[in-house]
Image (cartoon, grey):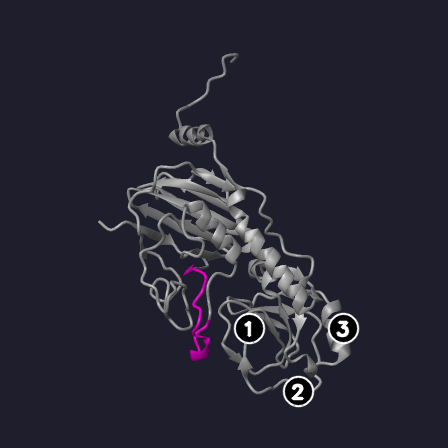
Amino acid sequence: MKPTLRIIFPGLFTTIQDAGRYGFQRLGVSLGGALDPVSLRAANLLAGNPACAGAIEALYVGPTFAVEADDARIAFAGADAAIELLASADAVHGERITPMQSVRVRRGQVVRIGSLKNGASLYMAIEGGFDIEPVLGSVSTDCRGKMGGWKGRTLAANDLLPLSRALATERDEYRIEGLDLSPPQRFRTVLGPQNDYFSETAIEGFFASEYTVSAESNRMGLRLDGPPLQHSHGFNIVSDAIATGSIQVPGGGQPIVLLADHQTTGGYPKIATVISADLPAMGRLPIGAKIRFAPTTVDEAARARRAFNATLESLPGKMVRIAPSAAIAAQLVECNLISGVHDAAA
């Protein structure tokens, strides 16, 4: 029988994502990929996969799934969440698992991921990855294009996700310590490419204002609520190419930060662009988050990117082996060896 993960409850918006679908934007195909590539990389590292392998991305509320393989190694990274390992689908309570660690799961056990806290996205990688055919070189889900991932859509109840491995390798479990996923105090941006469509007063107001992430946000873009920005030369331009992180301002004056699933061209002026080093943190922001922007230069953005790359390369050094005694203790708790307690004094 093919090893699979059986989806019991799909969560709010759960998809398969990897590093993205590069090289096809000229054909109108979005880049896509993980909103938070840092957490994707961390989860894959813990699972023993290549850094950009396909993993499950859960937004706001995580899925519940059963392991239908002899056993599997699963790792979690990203937002905080109540993650439980249950003995079966009928169990009410189970062993709690914290993000930023790997765990070995046996056949028939169920993983239940609740609401996410302190972030919008959580990544779950499985050792060996999913046995899913890439589309244009990627297994990322493009829901608008209905391609990639699992049947080109979000996961649904009773989906059977095929796994590449039926057994986990014999090795210790690990956690990652010291990885800071908190957002910056201000997101750094480079002005343009259409900052000339805004007055100096509007640009100063943009950098002086605080914005709130709107409930209308999605994988295409973060819609922000705040003081509206006034256009100097109208809000329609000849459509041009869009870079991830571009901040476009439609007629209503409320900025939109374009994220992984953004359209490839757009016809609204773009006041600034979030630098690539700050984009993963932008992808973690939950609804209601308060954010500010700061101007920077292209040279400073390049230096920030080099520092960001160094952080990614340092991830293996943050891996800490989980002591075998801790794993044994967890197994003993799961076995429920104590059936009751008597008060001798009574």
Q: Which residue is mark 1?
A: 243
Q: Give me the residue at 47% from left, 44% from top.
A: 83
Q: Is residue 28 magenta?
A: yes
Q: Nearer the viewer, residue 42 or 334?
A: 42
Amino acid of disc 2: Gly
**Residue 171 position in % (x across, y down):** 38, 37
The reply to whether residue 194 is in sight is: yes
How far apart marks 3 and 1 lie (CA) works out to 23 Å
Question: Is 197 or 67 nearer to us in this picture?
Answer: 197
Cβ–Cβ below 8 Å for labels 3 and 1? no
In the rendered structure, does residue 307 fall within the stretch colored magenta? no
Across and down, in percent, residue 112 comes to 42, 47
The stretch of residues the image draws in magenta is 16-30
The answer to whether one can see residue 288 in this image is no
| Residue 172 in picture, x, y percent from top left | 42, 36
Magenta stretch secondary structure, dominant: loop
Per the image, the residue denoted by label 2 is: 234
- What is the secondary structure assignment of the residue under circle 1? loop
Please give left or right for residue 301 compared with residue 80 in the image.
right
Counting from the top left corner in percent of width and height, residue 165 is at 30, 48
Q: Earlier in the sequence, mark 1 or mark 2?
A: 2
Q: Are marks 1 and 2 in contact (CB under 8 Å)?
A: no
Lower sequence index among marks 2 and 3? 3
| Residue visible at 55% across and 48% down in the picture | 314
**Disc 3: which residue:** 204
Density class for disc 2 (Cα within 10 Å; few <14, some 14-19, many ≥20) is few
Residue beneath the point at 35% across and 67% down? 135
Residue type (three-letter) at the residue carrying disc 3: Glu
